[in-house]
Structures are given as C-alpha cells and as structure tokens.
Image: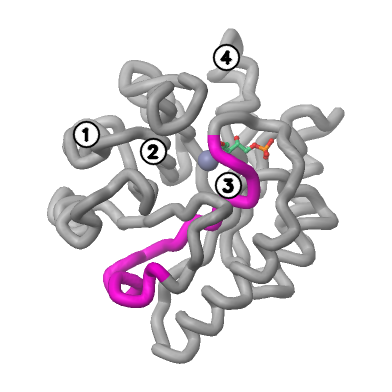
Amino acid sequence: MNHKIAPSLLSTDFLNLQQDIDMLNASDADWLHCDVMDGVFVPNISFGFPVLEQIKKVAQKPLDVHLMIVNPDKFIQQVKDAGGYMMTVHYEACTHLHRTVGAIHEAGMKAGVSLNPHTPVELLTDIIEDLDLVLIMSVNPGFGGQKFIPNSINKVARTRKMIDERNLHTLIEVDGGVNLDTGKQLLNAGADVLVAGSFVFSSTNPTETISSLKNL
Ligand code: DX5
Ligand code: ZN
C-alpha cells in the first residue's frame, strides 16, 4: 500500500468545487491532480490559473499539476505561484525538455514528464535521471471518462525496468481509465501513483472509492 492516489479534479462538480476538495482533504487521497488544457495541445479546454489559485486556498494536499498545453515554459512561475508541487509537462510539447525540467526545479517544484499513448518510454532514456515523475497517459489526453488503453501496462513495466536498473527514485504515475481492475494491473506492473477522475467522482461514495484504490 505504498502507492499514491491522485484524484483528478476534472471530474468534480465545478459549481461545488470546495465541497469536493473538502471531501478529498478528509480522504485517503495523497495528491490533487489538476488538469490544465489549452485547446491547442489537446482538443479541449479545462481550467487555468485563476481556478488553481482558488484550489490552492482550500487544498490540504499537494497539487499535482498536469499541463496539457504547448509552451509550458512560459507558465512555470505561474504554476509555482498557484501552489504547484509537481509540475508535469508533455514530452510532445517540449522542444528543449532538459531546459524545461531544469527551470521547473529552479522554481522550486518537482518535475514530471508525461507521454502520450503512442510515445515510447525509451525516449526518456537521456532525461529520466533528472525527473521526479514519469506520467504515462493511458488514454489520449483531453477528456475524462475514456477507455483505458491496455498497452499502457506494458509501458509501465518498461519504465519500471529503466528506473530500477539505474537505481532511481523517479515515480511512475498513470492517468486515464483507472479503476480497481486497471489500477491493480498497473500497480503489479510497477506504477507508484494512480490518477482517477470519473471512477472516483461518478461513484456513489467517492471517499470509499478512493480508499479502495488506496488499498489495492
Ligand atoms: C485526461 C486527464 C485525466 C482525466 C482522467 O486528459 O489528464 O487526468 O481527468 O479521467 P478518467 O480517470 O476519467 O479517465
Ligand atoms: Zn491528467
């Protein structure tokens, strides 16, 4: 039970966000996963810094900020100011990824890199030692409630191998279509952090659902 659970706020009731955050504060959730989308990198727009600033005021758990945007370098300080603990950028959105990761660290945050479903984990071979987290997308980013892509399990296993062979402490997070069944398989393959949106917030008792994910 060493793994972390990061419920995704994308599936919360935005009209009652504080209520949902209070629930998460009192739950077994470890981090609050915040999905920022720009309508360019992904075909959807979610929420941005004004909302993150409000979340920060009531959240009692670290904010795990997943940026599905082009040019994330432009917003590093804003993510930090909005309470970001982990700042995760997409591999596919960063031409100078090494520089981006360095700047995230310099701003005082943990740095994560996310991979779209078609992006091989082996492309991280020359940057993984600098990363605090690898986020493996198990759906095409942009929307909650999509179907889990089974090859993600294989990607987690390959990332686990890469990390263990080098004795690193980089965490493996998985995002998209996580439920008790896929969550179990991902943990068996070596995942450290499970993001779950619709599975948690469409359940009748989100607090219990979080606990069952935590107890997998
Ligand atoms: C999708 C987001 C996810 C999303 C997951 O692009 O990155 O964090 O909220 O939602 P579920 O768990 O419903 O697949
Ligand atoms: Zn996400």
Which residue is at a point 42% across and 36% down the rendered structure image? 68
Place of residue 184 in the rendered image (x, y in percent of width and height, measured from the top left): 78, 64
Marks 1,3: beta carbons within 8 A: no
The residue tagged 4 is 14
Q: Secondary structure at mark 1?
A: helix
Q: Which mark is residue 75?
A: 1
Disc 3 on helix, strand or loop?
strand
Q: What distance separates the C-alpha of mark 4 from that of mark 2?
A: 19 Å
Tell me the number on the disc at residue 136: none
Which of disc 1 and disc 4 is earlier in sequence? 4
Residue 157, percent from left and from top = 62, 76
Vertical placement of residue 161 versus 47, above or below: below
Q: Nearer the viewer, mark 4 or mark 2?
A: 2
Residue 187 magenta-highlighted: no
The residue that label 2 is drawn on is 67
Marks 4/1 in contact by CB < 8 Å: the verdict is no
| Residue at the front extreme, as displayed | 118
Which contiguous range is marked in magenta? 123-141
Mark 1 closeness class: few <14, some 14–19, many ≥20 residues within 10 Å: some
Q: CA distance from mark 4 to mark 1?
A: 23 Å
Please say whether residue 11 is visible from this viewpoint: yes
Mark 2 and 1 residues: CB-CB less than 8 Å, in contact? yes
Q: Which mark is residue 6?
A: 3
Q: Name the residue located 46 percent from the left edge and 91 percent from the top edge.
A: 165
Residue 57 appears in the figure: no
Which three-letter amino acid code belongs to the residue tagged 1?
Phe
What's the residue type where badge 3 is placed? Ala
Kind of residue sitting beneath label 4: Phe
Residue 159, relative to residue 106: is it above or below? below
Foreground residue among 102 and 64 = 102
Answer with mark 2 or mark 1, whichever residue precedes in sequence.
2
Sequence-first disc among 4 and 2? 4
